[in-house]
Image (cartoon, rainbow, N blue to C red):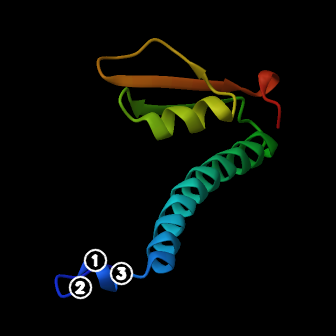
């Protein structure tokens, strides 16, 4: 990382690219892990006797959560203010 004591001549380009790529991959991994966890939770829940509907909520500006909920097949319901409501019915799930 670049500190106050470094000049631009002292910056190691390979190190900077490495740090940047790690940050990009960690963002990607976080999204992938969230989607994977949601999918596994849905699969587990629908294998549990008696669970027929899964619901979720997120803020309407939470793009990451919206993407994950869409990717796992949840259906968006009518919003309540700035809160988005979601559901997935067992008979419609692809798990």
Given contact means CB atoms under 8 Å apart, are the residues at marks 1 and 2 in contact?
yes
Q: Viewed as shown, does residue 73 lie left or right of 23?
A: right
Q: Quadrant of residue 49?
A: top right
Identify which residue, 95 or 63, lies in the foreground.
Answer: 63
Q: CA gap, disc 1 to disc 3?
A: 5 Å
- Expressed as whole percent of the image width and height from the top left, the position of residue 34 reads 59, 51
Q: Which residue is mark 3?
A: 11
- Labels 1 and 3 touching (C-beta < 8 A): yes
Residue drawn at 28 percent across, 77 percent down: 8
Picture coordinates of residue 63, whole percent (x, y) = 44, 34
Q: Please tell me whether residue 71 is drawn above or below residue 30 in the rendered image.
A: above
Instruction: Give me the residue at 44% from left, 74% from top.
Output: 16
Q: Secondary structure at mark 2?
A: loop
Mark 1: which secondary structure?
Answer: helix
Q: Which mark's residue is nearer the viewer, 1 or 2?
A: 1
Q: CA distance from mark 1 to mark 2?
A: 7 Å
Q: Position of residue 92 (x, y in %)?
A: 79, 22
Which residue is situated farthest in the top direction here?
Answer: 78
Residue at left offset 64%, top offset 52%: 32
Mark 2, residue position:
6
x and y percent of residue 56 in the render? 51, 33
Q: Are marks 3 and 2 in contact (CB under 8 Å)?
A: yes
Circle 1 Cα neighbour tier, 10 Å, few/some/many (<14 / 14–19 / ≥20): few
Q: CA distance from mark 3 to mark 2?
A: 7 Å
Q: In the figure, is residue 4 to the left or right of 69?
A: left
- Mark 1, residue position: 8
If you read the primary sequence from the N terminus, does the residue marked by circle 3 or circle 2 appear first?
2
Quadrant of the frame with the N terminus:
bottom left
């Amino acid at each position: 990382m670049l500190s106050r004591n470094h000049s631009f001549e002292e910056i190691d380009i390979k190190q900077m690219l490495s740090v940047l790529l790690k940050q990009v991959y960690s963002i990607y991994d976080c999204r992938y892990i969230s989607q994977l966890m949601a999918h596994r939770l849905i699969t587990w829940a629908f294998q549990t006797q008696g669970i027929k509907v899964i619901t979720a909520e997120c803020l309407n500006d939470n793009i990451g959560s919206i993407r994950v909920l869409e990717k796992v097949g949840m259906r968006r319901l009518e919003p309540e203010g700035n809160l988005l409501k979601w559901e997935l019915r067992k008979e419609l799930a692809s798990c």
